[in-house]
Amino acid sequence: MAEQPQRRTRTPKRATVVRTERLTPHMVRVVLAVDPAAELAVGEFTDHYVKLLFPAEGEQLPDPLNVEALRAQLPRERWPRTRTYTVRSYDPESREMAVDFVVHGDDGVAGPWAARAQAGEVLHFMGPGGGYAPDPSADWHLLAGDESALPAVAAAAERLPAGAPARIYVEVAGPAEEQKLATEADADVVWLHRGERPVGAALAEAVAALDFPAGRVHAFVHGEANVVKELRRQLRVEHAIPREQLSISGYWRLGKDEDGWQSSKREWNAEVEREQES
C-alpha cells in the first residue's frame, strides 16, 4: 500500500495591535506588529489576504496557538472562527501590517473586535495568500467593488503604472464612506452611493454603462457574490474578456456569514462559470 501523504501542519502567525484608526464612520484600520519570528511574504500582489483567527463565543485562544491541537480537543462549535481580510499595507522594516475592517455596530465577529481593539492585544492569523496585481502591459485597467473590496482596490490603485488609463468604481453606503485613493495612473474614480438601494445595484449599473476603451483590459472585480455574478456575466459574456485578464470573485454573500460562504464558494463559482460558458 502506498504511503498516504502527511497533512501539512499550518502554524498560525502572531501579531500585536499597535494602534487603530477610524477611517470613516464604518471603516476601522488596525495596525498590527507581526512577530519577528514569523515569515511573511507580502508585496508581490495587491490583493494579499490573511485569515484572522478569533475565539468562539465564551472561549479564549491560548498563546502560542496550535489550531490542529485545539480542533482535536474541542467540538466544532468551540473551534476558532476564521475571517478573511485584505492586507491594506505592510512595512517590512517595521513589520507593521495594516488591515481595514468594515464595522456595522455589533454585527459579525471581526468588525466588533476591530472597533474595540486596544494596543497590546494579540491576534493570530494564517497566510498571506493572494494572486492579483495590475498588469503593467495592459492597455487599461478596471477596478470595481464594494466596501469589502475597497482595501484591495486602494492597494491596486497605488500600484497602477504612472499614466495608465484606469476606471475605478467603488460602491459605499454614502459620501461619508469615501476615502482618498492615491494613484499615479490616469484614473477616473467614481464613488457610488448606495443609499437605500440593494447592495451592488449601483455598481452593476455603472459597469454596465461603461463605454469600454479600446485595447486589452486587466480587471479586478470583487464584492458581494450575487453582484459579482452579474458583473462576471457582463465581462465574460457581453464583452468577451478572457478569463486570464480577470480577477473576479465574491468576497462575501448576502445572508451568509463567512463560514457559510466559504463552505459553498468553490461550488458557487464553478456553477456560475458553467452557466456563463454555456
Image (cartoon, rainbow, N blue to C red):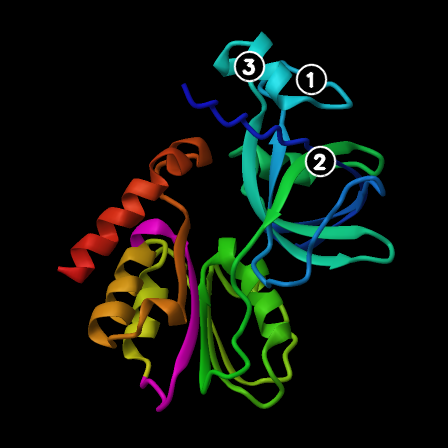
Q: Is residue 96 above or below residue 82?
A: below
Neighbour class for label 2 at 10 Å: few (<14), some, many (≥20)?
few
Residue drawn at point x = 55 percent, y = 32 percent = 82
**Which residue in the protein does label 3 denote?**
78
* Numbered disc 1: secondary structure: loop
Identity of the residue furthest to the left in this view: 278
Figure quadrant of residue 16: top right
- Measure the C-alpha gap from mark 3 to mark 2: 22 Å
Magenta-drawn segment:
211-226
Neighbour class for label 1 at 10 Å: few (<14), some, many (≥20)?
few
Figure quadrant of residue 176: bottom right
Figure quadrant of residue 12: top right
Residue drawn at point x = 44 percent, y = 31 percent = 259
Q: Nearer the viewer, residue 57 or 218?
A: 218
Q: Amino acid at mark 1?
A: Gln
Residue 214 on the magenta segment: yes
Q: Nearer the viewer, residue 183 or 27?
A: 183
Q: Amino acid at mark 2?
A: Arg
User: Which label is found at residue 60?
Assistant: 1
Identity of the residue furthest to the front in this view: 1
Please say whether residue 192 is visible from this viewpoint: no
